[in-house]
Image: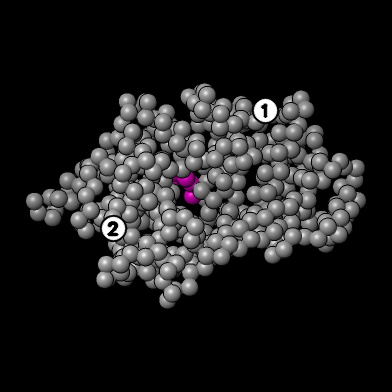
Amino acid sequence: MNGFMKTTKLMLNKKILNDPVYGFIGVPRGLVFELVEHPYFQRLRRIKQLSLTHYVYPGALHTRFHHALGALHLMTEAIEVLRSKGTEVTEAEAEAVFIAILLHDIGHGPYSHTLENTLINVSHEHISALFMEQLNEEFDGRLDLAIQIFKDDYKKKFLHQLVSSQLDMDRLDYLNRDSFFTGVHEGVIGYDRIIKMLAVNDGELVVEQKGIYSVEKFLIARRLMYWQVYLHKTVLSAEQMLIQALLRAKTLVRRGVELTMPDSLHFFISRDWTAEDFAGNRKSMLEHFALLDDHDIAFAIKYWMNSSDRLLSYLCEALVNRRLFRLQFSLKPFSESHLLMLRAKLSNWWGEASPGDLSHLLILGAESNSAYSKSKDEIKILYKDGRVEPLSMNSEYNIQAKLVKKYFLCHPKEPIR
C-alpha cells in the first residue's frame, strides 16, 4: 500500500478535528468516538480546565473537553512510537488505553479542582472510575480492559504509566495547552520530542538518554506553571472567594433559608454526600452529578448577588465584578498577633459579625508543590549501555524534588489599606 492510500485509510478510520494547539487531530471511530458523543463526556465542554484563571489570564477559557481530546491525541502518538520500537500493543490494548486517557478527567466537578472538596468530598479520580464502571455497563463490558489499565490492574504497567505517572499524556497535554491559552511561555515543553524518546524496558515506561534534557525542561516548566498560573495569588484569591460563597450558601440552606439555584446544585448543597453514597446508589448519583457544571455555579453566584444575606451577597457581587480579596503568601505561618489585628480591623469595618462570618472574610490556608517526587514511580532513564536508573540518580541534573510550601492569608482590601 503506497503512502497516500495508507494515509487515506487512516483518515477514514478517524473523526478529524481541528485543535488550536496541535492542528488536525484524529479521534478513532468506533467505541472511542461513541464515548466522546456520550452526554457524560459532552458535559466536559461545560467545565473550565483552569477554573477562575481567566480572571488573571483572559484567554484561559479552555475546557476539560479540549484537554481530554488533546491527551487522547498525544496517547495515539505515544502508542505509535512504542510500536515502532518493537513494543507489542494489540489493537484491543490500544483502544483500551485511548479510552482510559479520554475518560481520566470525566469525574471533575464544576470549576475543576476548586470545588472538589466543597460541593462533594469525593475525589474526581474516584468519580471518574465510577463513570467508567457505569459506561461499561451501558456498553456491555467493552470498557473492561480500559478500567484495568486506569486502575493499574493490567499486566502491562507501561500502559497505566502513559495514563498516570510523573510523565504521562495528561501532564504533557495540560502543560502545553495551559501555556498556549494563558500565553505563559515558561510552560512551553518539547512534548513531541519527549514522546519520541519514550520506550519500554521490562514492562515499564522509560525515556531514552537522548531525551533527558527535554524531561528536565518539562519538570522546570511544570514548577514554573504552578507558581505563575495554577497558584498565582490572584487566581487563588478568586478561587477562595468562590469556595467561601458556596460554603456560605450551604450554611444558609441547612438553616432552612431558601436560595434560588438550579436543582442540580441544590441537590449537592443540601447535604454532604460521601463516597459510600456514590457506591451505594451509583447510577442515580452519577445522573445528578452529570447535570452539574460551571453554568449552574455561575447562575447561582450571579443570582445570589441580590441575596438578603449580606455576607453571601457581598461575596458574590465581589466575584462577579472582580473586586477580589488581597492575598499574601508567606514561607512560614502568620503570627497570631497579626491575625488578631486583621480580625479586629475586619470586625470594625464589617460591623456586627459572628466568628463564623469572619471566617468567610479572613481565609487562611497553605499550598505546596514540588517539581518532582522521588517517593513514587520515578521517571526512569534508559542509557545507551542498557542501564535503567531513576532520574534522581543522575548527578548531572539538578532536578528540584524539594516540596515548597507557602502559607496564604486572604481578606477584603477595603478595611486594610
Could one spot residue 321 in this view of the protein? yes
Residue at mark 1 to residue at mark 2: CA–CA distance: 51 Å
Badge 1 marks a residue whose secondary structure is loop
Amino acid identity at mark 2: Asn
Q: Residues within 10 Å of mark 2 (few under 14, many from 20)?
A: some
Q: Which residue is drawn at 39% across and 43% down?
A: 152
Q: Does the magenta stretch include residue 63?
A: yes
Q: Give the residues drawn in magenta, as a range.
A: 62-66
Question: From this viewpoint, is residue 186 visible?
Answer: no
Secondary element under disc 2, as helix, strand or loop, is strand
Q: What residue type is labelled 1?
A: Ser
Height in image: 310 above or below 83? above
Q: Which residue lies furthest to the left in this view?
A: 1
The image's mark for residue 28 is none
Look at 87% across and 42% down and name the residue there: 353
Q: Which mark is residue 201?
A: 2
Reply above or below: 375 against 121. below
The number of numbered badges drawn on the structure is: 2
Name the residue beneath numbered marker 1: 270
Query: Where residue 212 sits: x, y (%)?
Result: 37, 69
Extreme residue in the bottom direction: 396
The C terminus lies in quadrant: bottom right
Q: In this view, does 220 lie above or below 256?
A: below
Task: Give whichever of discs 1 and 2 has the lower sequence position.
Answer: 2
Reply yes or no: does residue 4 show up in magenta.
Answer: no
- Side of 348 relative to 128 (left or right): right
Q: Nearer the viewer, mark 1 or mark 2?
A: 2
**Looking at the magenta stretch, what is its main secondary structure?**
helix
Neighbourhood count class around disc 1 (C-alpha, 10 Å): few under 14, some 14–19, many 20 upward: some
Q: Residue at x 33, y 60 (%)?
A: 206
Q: Quadrant of residue 387?
A: bottom left
The x and y percentages for residue 368 are 61, 58
